[in-house]
């Protein structure tokens, strides 16, 4: 259909004026008006020199005469609403049905994009914030793949630094040979000692403050923090005893993380370790000093002056020669572009509290002469919390919302609600258990991802597992309902007759299906799984309206029956496809 081209021709024919196609504004017709597409007439009045209503009337008549699939039009306050014929929509539907990879671009036809997410510290287990981070990063990677991009999923593991030495020192002092068990994962064991360090260090600092030492000074004079700093220096010097302890405790954390990632359903193509990349960063800092990008202060610390960019000075190397996060991130970025020379973009999935950090990082990389710094993007997302009274995000005090505990709680909640509904008769205990996990994780993922990434959010476990409303289980339940409807239908059906009369609910469903490729494209451009999530919800609402409005299988007209079967099949496939991009599994029975 040549709508915009025909409009350009129409303006030339009716008004003798040439107009750019970019001037023409076309949008989906609002639900409270009749029509499929709306043309805004106001930008065209300069050419028509007539009222919005008269311009709309003339252009509508021209389109009706010159585009066969347009069946009618109306004008509302200068907005020209165009309607397309049933034959047009059925034709579009047949094209969608014939496309087995509907909505997806051909694999590896786009650019190469790297997506970083998770990026934990090896001094504690993953928590609620990591859950949103992982689910968001993984989904963005899958959506970019759906847009044809070659995607590399990575994480940088923050496995060195003063915070790591804190848990190591605590274990050395109070560990007494304790090791992970089947009841206590390695990351949780290490996290317990991090908490122990913080509690004891806090007590030391308070004692110094009580004795008259200024709090700011006390934080640097405590015996524990000084020992931890000494341990960091020994680690950088590869002290055998310190290094062996570091390797052992990090290994415990890696094993624990792997279990969490598997249960969460996320994966990575490549891992980067701060313990390696920080060295590259230190080399680049020294080179930057020679180039005048950085300067050294009297105490030996190295800084970058960003005053000309309207920012502050930024520390890139401490006075004692140890690195900071910026040092590591400089080295990691360079490693990645060396590993993947065809990389066209690098997406960092990191919370919005690090907005300034990444603004500075990209500026520094650019100052160091790396042109690819322009293609680095910070996918900044809002923080996530639980309703009041359900937990706090303070890992130093040992009260973080643990990711493993949260996922287990989701499965328990799903089990409780499913048993109340009582629709799982005849299923084995194992199948029920598997289903509870699928429902629980579906609820968690969908609830996290339906919110725009930029917005902070409150995650309510019970609300997320509701089997009605804008939730994962509601979408999963509709998918299972369609599976049940189609379970006894095995007939093969060809293309649908273009002359079938469509019910309004059927046309609405076809229009929703027709929108799927656009949704995937825009979600990729905006790095927004929320667009896919809310599309899936709209499609499910549309199908439920269809289900409640017309009979699907009890129809005498064979052509209508075939159409409703094929429509149900395609809706089921697209629901599963959209939810797959969110990492959500779709059960066939609930």
Image: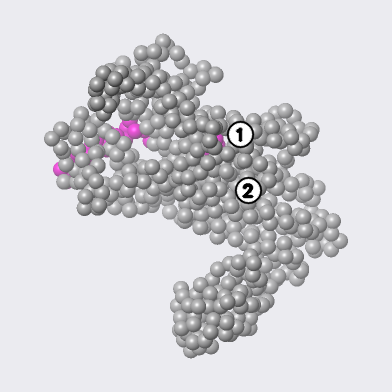
- Between discs 1 and 2, the one toward the N terminus: 1
Q: In the image, which disc is placed on residue 410?
A: 1
Task: Please provide percent x and percent y for residue 390.
Answer: 54, 32
Judged from the image, the secondary structure of the residue bearing numbered disc 2 is loop
The circle on residue 40 is none
**Vertical placement of 574 versus 433: above or below?**
below
Query: Mark 2 highlights which residue?
Result: 470
Residue drawn 35% across and 19% down?
203
Q: Which residues are magenta?
A: 264-291
Assess disc 1: are there few (<14), some (14-19) or many (≥20) residues with their C-alpha within 10 Å of its C-alpha.
many
Residue 267 colored in magenta in the image: yes
Q: Dot 1 lies on which element?
A: helix
Q: Quadrant of the N terminus?
A: bottom right
Judge whether residue 51 can be spotted in this image. yes
> Which residue of the protein is positioned furthest toward the left in this rendering?
298
User: Distance of mark 1 from mark 2, alpha carbons?
Assistant: 17 Å
Residue 512's x, y, as percent? 64, 60
- Residue 464, by quadrant, is top right
């Amino acid at each position: 259909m040549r709508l915009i081209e025909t409009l350009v021709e129409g303006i030339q024919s009716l008004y003798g004026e040439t107009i750019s196609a970019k001037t023409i504004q076309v949008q989906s017709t609002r639900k409270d008006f009749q029509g499929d597409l709306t043309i805004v007439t106001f930008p065209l009045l300069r050419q028509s020199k007539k009222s919005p209503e008269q311009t709309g009337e003339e252009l509508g008549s021209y389109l009706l005469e010159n585009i066969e699939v347009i069946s009618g039009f109306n004008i509302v306050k200068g907005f020209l609403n165009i309607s397309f014929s049933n034959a047009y929509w059925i034709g579009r539907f047949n094209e969608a049905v014939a496309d087995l990879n509907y909505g997806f671009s051909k694999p590896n036809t786009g650019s190469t994009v790297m997506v970083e997410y998770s990026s934990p510290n090896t001094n504690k287990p993953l928590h609620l914030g990591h859950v949103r981070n992982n689910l968001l990063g993984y989904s963005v990677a899958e959506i970019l793949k759906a847009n044809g991009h070659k995607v590399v999923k990575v994480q940088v593991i923050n496995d060195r630094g003063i915070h790591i030495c804190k848990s190591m020192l605590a274990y050395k002092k109070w560990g007494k040979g304790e090791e992970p068990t089947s009841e206590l994962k390695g990351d949780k064991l290490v996290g317990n000692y991090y908490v122990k360090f913080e509690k004891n260090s806090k007590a030391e600092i308070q004692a110094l403050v009580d004795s008259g030492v200024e709090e700011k000074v006390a934080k640097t004079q405590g015996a524990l923090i000084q020992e931890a700093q000494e341990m960091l220096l020994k680690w950088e010097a590869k002290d055998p005893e310190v290094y062996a302890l570091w390797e052992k405790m990090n290994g415990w954390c890696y094993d624990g993380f792997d279990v969490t990632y598997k249960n969460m359903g996320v994966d990575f193509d490549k891992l980067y370790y701060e313990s390696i990349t920080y060295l590259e960063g230190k080399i680049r800092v020294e080179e930057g000093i020679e180039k005048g990008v950085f300067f050294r202060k009297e105490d030996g610390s190295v800084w970058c002056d960003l005053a000309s960019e309207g920012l502050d000075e930024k520390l890139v190397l401490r006075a004692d020669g140890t690195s900071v996060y910026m040092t590591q991130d400089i080295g990691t970025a360079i490693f990645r572009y060396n590993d993947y020379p065809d990389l066209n973009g690098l997406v960092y999935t990191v919370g919005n509290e690090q907005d300034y950090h990444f603004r500075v990082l990209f500026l520094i990389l650019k100052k160091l002469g790396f042109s690819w710094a322009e293609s680095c993007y910070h996918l900044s997302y809002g923080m996530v919390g639980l309703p009041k009274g359900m937990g706090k995000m303070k890992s130093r005090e040992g009260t973080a919302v643990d990711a493993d505990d949260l996922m287990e709680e989701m499965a328990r909640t799903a089990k409780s609600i499913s048993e109340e509904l009582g629709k799982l008769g005849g299923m084995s205990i194992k199948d029920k258990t598997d289903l509870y996990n699928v429902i629980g994780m579906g609820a968690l993922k969908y609830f996290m991802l339906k919110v725009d990434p930029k917005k902070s959010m409150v995650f309510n476990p019970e609300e997320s597992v509701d089997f009605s409303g804008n939730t994962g289980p509601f979408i999963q339940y509709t998918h299972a309902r369609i599976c049940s409807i189609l379970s006894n239908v095995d007939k093969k059906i060809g293309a649908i007759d273009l002359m079938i009369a469509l019910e309004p609910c059927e046309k609405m469903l076809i229009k929703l299906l027709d929108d799927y490729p656009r949704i995937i494209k825009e979600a990729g451009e905006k790095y927004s799984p929320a667009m896919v999530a809310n599309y899936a919800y709209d499609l499910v609402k549309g199908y439920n309206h269809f289900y409640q409005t017309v009979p699907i299988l009890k129809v005498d007209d064979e052509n209508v029956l075939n159409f409703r079967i094929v429509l149900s099949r395609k809706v089921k496939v697209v629901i599963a496809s959209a939810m797959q991009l969110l990492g959500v599994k779709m059960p066939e029975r609930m």
